């Protein structure tokens, strides 16, 4: 199986996926120290779930049976590897695949999502039972989930108007609710 998209449909799916990652990049690549680490894990996980939901809604063929971990550590890593290989000159020979990779590479470079950590990747683990316990001690879990759902809905509304400040509003809303 090739890293490089072989047909228009695969390329369309890769571009839509990259656009989703770009849309949610401030959530997906939330640096340490912005919010409590437990909340950071939850926010990042919810962000990748959002990307997966968008891909499922767009009818992407690769999403069957996928979860957010497959998206973060599978699909995203493969797309990054394909673009990095292409940029090193190790790309495809087929002209159509070259055009596909050129468009994808340009998009990822222009939006700075190829290497969002600037060479210093951060790991985001999954929430552990201890993390969940600590979250539920601070909040009633349903309240916390309602809070995040409301924040996501608000971000969706604001995205159409002001993209740059939506993330900052979510972070501030979370900070106001933290004890």
Image (cartoon, rainbow, N blue to C red):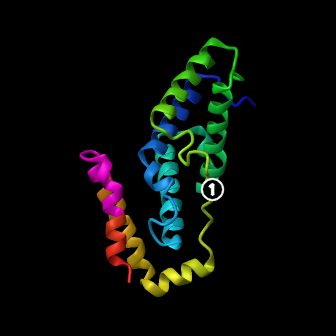
Q: Position of residue 49 (x, y in %)?
A: 51, 56
- Residue under the point 36% across and 71% down: 174
Locate residue 164, reporting x and y percent: 32, 48
Side of 133 where 157 appears, left or right: left
Mark 1, residues whose alpha carbon is within 10 Å: few (<14), some, or many (≥20)? some
The location of residue 71, given as percent across then percent down, is: 60, 49
Q: Residue furthest left?
A: 161
Pick the residue in front: 137 or 58. 137
Q: Is residue 80 magenta?
A: no
The C terminus lies in quadrant: bottom left
Q: Which residue sits furthest right?
A: 1
Helix, strand or loop for the magenta stretch, by majority: helix
Closer to the camera in the image, 22 or 97: 22
104 with respect to 1 (left or right)? left
Magenta residues span: 156-170
Hey, which residue is sitting farthest top in the picture?
95
């Amino acid at each position: 199986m090739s890293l490089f998209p072989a047909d228009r449909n695969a390329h369309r799916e890769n571009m839509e996926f990259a656009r989703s990652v770009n849309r949610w990049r401030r959530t997906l690549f939330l640096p340490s120290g912005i919010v409590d680490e437990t909340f950071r894990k939850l926010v990042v996980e919810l962000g990748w779930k959002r990307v997966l939901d968008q891909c499922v809604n767009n009818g992407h063929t690769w999403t069957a049976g996928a979860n957010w971990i497959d998206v973060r550590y599978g699909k995203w890593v493969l797309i990054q590897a394909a673009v990095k290989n292409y940029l090193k000159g190790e790309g495809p020979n087929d002209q159509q695949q070259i055009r596909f990779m050129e468009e994808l590479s340009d998009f990822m470079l222009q939006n700075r999502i190829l290497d969002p950590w600037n060479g210093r990747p951060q790991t985001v683990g999954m929430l552990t039972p201890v993390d969940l316990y600590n979250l539920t001690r601070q909040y009633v879990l349903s309240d916390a989930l309602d809070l995040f759902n409301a924040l996501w809905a608000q971000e969706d509304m604001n995205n159409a108007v002001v993209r740059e400040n939506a993330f900052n509003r979510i972070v501030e809303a979370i900070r106001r609710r933290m004890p």
